[in-house]
């Protein structure tokens, strides 16, 4: 299992957790975060603390996801770095084959074609 595969799996897991944390949040303090304690004033941890936890979790997961994505670039197998584009290789001589030319129509050919199409 390569390092990039590990990074890819971590990125998928963190992205899923980030989606879940964002979907649980409600900008007005309602939603699932306020229903943990039964909806009354005696809530487990309180709505404010639950919202703070979800808000901090969102920021931490988003930062961790960004760091994972940037560091996964290091883990990508770059292969042989000595390979370069063949277009930049100066050892190959450019092709000396002549380009095909389009047939030229003279005024007489155009007149003959027009005369044939009228008849």
Image: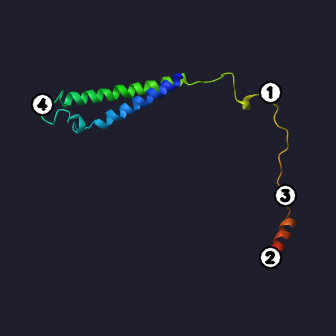
**Mark 1 or mark 3, which is nearer to you?**
1
Residue 26 pos. (x, y %): 26, 38
Judging depth in this view, the residue of 114 and 35 nearest the camera is: 35
Q: Secondary structure at mark 2?
A: helix
What residue sits right under mark 2 in the picture?
118
Q: Earlier in the sequence, mark 3 or mark 4?
A: 4
For label 1, the crowd category at 10 Å Cα-Cα, with few meaning under 14, some 14 to 19 and many 20 or more, is: few
Residue of label 4? 42
Q: Residue furthest right?
A: 108
Cα separation, mark 4 vs mark 2, equals 97 Å
* Element at label 1: loop
Residue for badge 3:
104
Give the mark nearest the N terminus, 4 or 2. 4
Closer to the camera: disc 2 or disc 1? 1
Up the image or down, 103 lies above or below 11; here it is below
Above or below, 9 against 117 in this view is: above
- Circles 2 and 1: CB atoms closer than 8 Å: no
User: Comparing marks 4 and 1, which lies closer to the viewer?
Assistant: 4
Q: How many labels sit on residues? A: 4
Mark 1 or mark 3: whose residue is earlier in sequence: 1
Q: Is residue 79 left or right of residue 70?
A: right
Q: Earlier in the sequence, mark 4 or mark 1?
A: 4
Q: Residue at x 31, y 27 (%)?
A: 57
Neighbours of disc 3 within 10 Å: few (<14), some (14-19), many (20+): few
């Amino acid at each position: 299992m390569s390092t990039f595969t590990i990074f890819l799996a971590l990125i998928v897991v963190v992205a899923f957790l980030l989606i879940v944390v964002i979907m649980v949040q409600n900008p007005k303090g309602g939603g699932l975060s306020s229903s943990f304690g039964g909806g009354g004033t005696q809530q487990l941890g309180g709505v404010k603390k639950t919202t703070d936890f979800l808000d901090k979790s969102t920021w931490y997961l988003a930062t961790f996801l960004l760091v994972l994505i940037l560091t996964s670039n290091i883990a990508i197998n770059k292969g042989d770095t000595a390979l370069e584009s063949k277009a930049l290789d100066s050892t190959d001589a450019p092709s000396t084959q002549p380009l095909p030319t389009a047939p030229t129509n003279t005024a007489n050919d155009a007149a003959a074609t027009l005369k044939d199409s009228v008849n």
